């Protein structure tokens, strides 16, 4: 299985699903399941029991992980959704924008 090319803190745009077109940042990357948690995307309602931290309980909105194939990285240089390439060898690998050719990292 290949490594994920999207990391925590990256700006991504959603290319399919109910939140198609949304642009936001990645809060968590889950490489073992090939999913990412994107801010304000994939929001679901969850019933929460009263706890010590949340004594009133109630219905909460949380972001659920979405598959990494439904998002595209937004290049910080050209500000367009792009595929990601890798350039370099060994420890010196960097992610590269396929549209403008500039380094992402």
Image (spheres, helix red, strand yellow):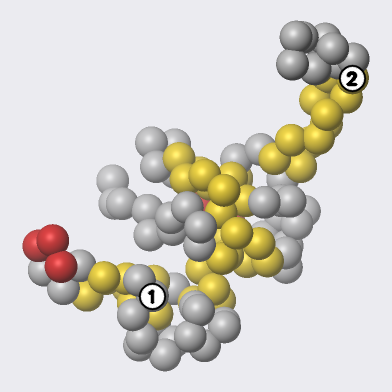
SS assignment at label 2: strand
Image quarter hosting the C terminus:
bottom left
Relative height, residue 84 to residue 54 (above, below): below
Instruction: Determine the CA span between mark 1 and mark 2.
Output: 41 Å
Relative height, residue 101 to residue 66 (above, below): below
Q: Earlier in the sequence, mark 1 or mark 2?
A: 2
Disc 1 residue crowd, few under 14, some 14–19, many 20+, Cα 10 Å = some
SS assignment at label 1: loop
Residue visible at 72% across and 64% down? Answer: 22
**In the rendered image, is residue 14 in sight?**
no
Query: Residue 48 location, x and y as percent?
Result: 80, 17
Query: Residue 26 location, x and y as percent?
Result: 56, 54
Residue visible at 74% across and 51% down? Answer: 40
28 to the left or right of 38? left
Relative height, residue 55 to residue 11 (above, below): above
Residue visible at 39% across and 82% down? Answer: 98
Query: Residue 24 location, x and y as percent?
Result: 66, 62
Q: Which residue is mark 1?
A: 104
- Residue 33's tag is none
Residue visible at 75% across and 9% down? Answer: 52
Disc 2 residue crowd, few under 14, some 14–19, many 20+, Cα 10 Å = few
Circle 1/circle 2 CB separation < 8 Å = no
Q: Which residue is mark 2?
A: 58
């Amino acid at each position: 299985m290949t490594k994920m090319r999207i990391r925590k803190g990256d700006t991504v745009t959603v290319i399919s699903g109910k939140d198609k077109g949304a642009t936001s940042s990645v809060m968590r990357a889950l490489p073992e399941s090939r999913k990412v948690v994107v801010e304000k995307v994939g929001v679901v309602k969850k019933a929460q029991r009263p706890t010590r931290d949340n004594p009133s309980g109630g219905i909460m909105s949380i972001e659920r992980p979405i598959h990494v194939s439904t998002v595209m990285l937004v290049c910080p240089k050209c500000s367009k959704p792009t595929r990601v390439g890798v350039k370099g060898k060994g420890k010196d690998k960097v992610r590269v924008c396929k549209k403008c050719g500039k380094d992402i990292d």
